Image (cartoon, coloured by chain):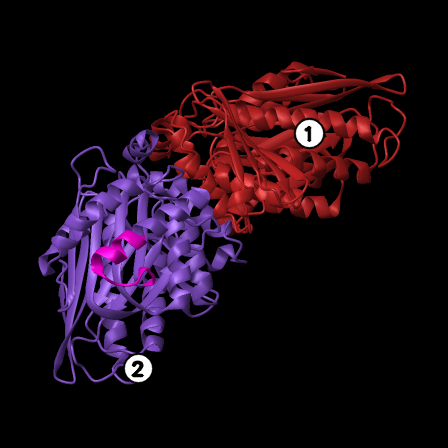
Chain colours: A red, B purple
Amino acid sequence: MTLYKKAILPIGFKAHALNCGIRKSNKLDLALFYSDAPAKTAAVFTANKIIAAPLKINKKHLLMSRYFQAIIANSGNANAFTGTAGIKDAQETAKALSKALKIKKEEVLVASTGIIGKRLPAEKIKLAIPVLVKGLSLRGIQKAAHAIMTTDTFSKEMTAKFKLGGKQVTICAVAKGAGMIAPNMATLLCFIFTDAFITQGALNKALKQAVEGSFNRITVDGCMSTNDNVILMANAAAGNPLINTEAGYDLFAKALKLITLELAKMIVKDAEGATKFIQIQVLKAKSVLEAKSVALNIANSNLFKTAVYGQNPNFGRVVAAVGSSGIDVQEKKLSVKLSPLKKKEVSVQVSLGRGQAQATVYTSDLTPEYIKINAEYN
Amino acid sequence: MTLYKKAILPIGFKAHALNCGIRKSNKLDLALFYSDAPAKTAAVFTANKIIAAPLKINKKHLLMSRYFQAIIANSGNANAFTGTAGIKDAQETAKALSKALKIKKEEVLVASTGIIGKRLPAEKIKLAIPVLVKGLSLRGIQKAAHAIMTTDTFSKEMTAKFKLGGKQVTICAVAKGAGMIAPNMATLLCFIFTDAFITQGALNKALKQAVEGSFNRITVDGCMSTNDNVILMANAAAGNPLINTEAGYDLFAKALKLITLELAKMIVKDAEGATKFIQIQVLKAKSVLEAKSVALNIANSNLFKTAVYGQNPNFGRVVAAVGSSGIDVQEKKLSVKLSPLKKKEVSVQVSLGRGQAQATVYTSDLTPEYIKINAEYN
């Protein structure tokens, strides 16, 4: 298996992006991802009870069909908490795109990221659609990866290539960060494209596992987004022997896990204002869930995160965070190790002395720059 | 009922404080609170699973007796995560004080606040005890209120005086903030002294209710402390008709509630680095617990807190926080109101449209100064 830190679309997929005027600067703000053939699709959504309009549309469309051909995604506006008007805006966008692509509107998925509570300028998007469609290309993926960025300072792109039954299979993914990052899930948007020939069951299972081991293991600020959506499309163009939950599954799942974990780490490395990348490993827990919960409690402790920023080895704050996680931990069995804090990558190892399970979570430090970014963001 | 924003000890109580050398500066770091007669005592402790050595001692002593005469409290060292050595240190302090006061060591309560994970310099405390005891006076309470401060910029003091059966009853309380503030509880330390004649049952009930309505309604950073301890001592010197859970209870409970709420608000106003005092009111919830839980979720949202700091009316962040609180709220029934953010006191009103219950929580904004304080604190 070969991994690439850039997006290389599999055969049969195309993308393009442009500035349609949602963002005042000339920054790319509208991306289109397109599959020549209907592609089998799996998706994971935020656990927030208030979800953005595009997610409502996608959930509805996914109930009607499992085959999709297009994702249209904008940055600069989340189309969240926008009521029925927001749903109408997202629907009209999907409809306009479906006409331009000559597909059904139920074969379109929509995504938005940006400010919550403002009406989506659907007219601007509709006006841009013809140009967007005309510009579709294999290489357009880089532009598209940039168009979904908000406060990100670099695009998040990963590709895995591996052989299956003598055929080359590609999985390509793009994601965005960089604030309002917390499980479940913990990325704003991630779009994954593969030419694998795979059953719906295997596709769903692999995506769920990959998200659990990647985007659900990172936190920047403990704030759960209304717009999180990971979409995985498989167009079967590789011509590999069919992957199901047994045959070929391990390799496909491993590749997907690797690239989503890399994207998740990139999101943390590009976290708003971050100066440190922090790995928190909780060992000897009773269950993986327990280990993960304790690790996230440490990762979301502002006091711990500011101590790391200050290169101040205040392990008492780790202890306080462990104790407040609700787990019945005993002081005499608890051990905490901190790596030297001068380095850019820092690790914390906590042993609970309660069992054999473990989990690792990634986070960033809390800095004055995070506050500056979020005090001004609007 | 008359309220005073300063500590005025009831008859029969004395206090004193000095610098015993735990803190390198000349700042007061050791306080003694003393009751001439054994005083009926109620206490509430942090819900953190890792608790500091003094809390272990106090819990043990409270199982043995309900009558206490002294509280010795230090700042600069939390004596938390210090294992059996920490327990020994706290025990020796209590023992040395009991000898100097000629009382039993089980009549002494201990309290510590400061850095976690460092051995308490018990020798320094023991050496200071004779001077501490000698200096006890009614007016010593102001010094004592200052000695328990850590990053606080002002002392937190409140007194309530009211008549009961023709007798004047006094309740006097001192507390400290100013970081690691989150329920349950949400003050580091609070000591309350009253000359009321009251049953143990009424004392316990009134304290529990007061803490629930005050210290459990504030959060600064969502970080739960290992050292939280509220102690209420009643010496019966006022000579009022006995208060039980019926007779006289409402007046006593109301006074206690008022002064603890004022102290809680002072803690938020003096929160580390804070520039804003934020009141979050959640209305039309199914239960008080639900309302409180949603309010705390907003209050602990870094994105919301930085928006308030930036005077940026980003109500989408309130919506995202409501949605992530786990409550099954419907977007169309949810309403959010923000007061103008230019003022020093800001209020948020959220209506869930689910029922008739409500709760109010207080918090502060998240600022670069909070990070500076906590990056350097050690």
| Image disc number at residue B241 | none
Identify the residue shown where x is 20% and y is 41%. Answer: B20
Relative image position of residue A20 (x, y in whole percent): 49, 26
Q: Quadrant of the N terminus of chain B?
A: bottom left
Q: Can residue B223 be seen in this snapshot?
A: no
Q: Can residue A90 be seen in this snapshot?
A: yes
- Going by the numbered disc 2, the residue's amino acid type is Asn
In magenta, the rendered stretch is: B94-106
Q: In which quarter of the image is the C terminus of chain B?
A: top left
Badge 1 is on which residue?
A101
Is most of the magenta stretch helix, strand or loop? helix
Q: Quadrant for residue B335, please give it.
A: bottom left
Badge 2 is on which residue?
B244
Please state if A211 lies on the left or on the right of A273 as rendered: right
The residue mark sitting in front, 2 or 1, is: 2
Are the numbered discs 2 and 1 placed on the same chain, yes or no? Answer: no
Identify the chain of the residue marked 1, using the numbered disc in the image. Answer: A
Q: Residues within 10 Å of mark 1 (few under 14, many from 20)?
A: some
Disc 2 to disc 1, how far (Cα)? Answer: 78 Å
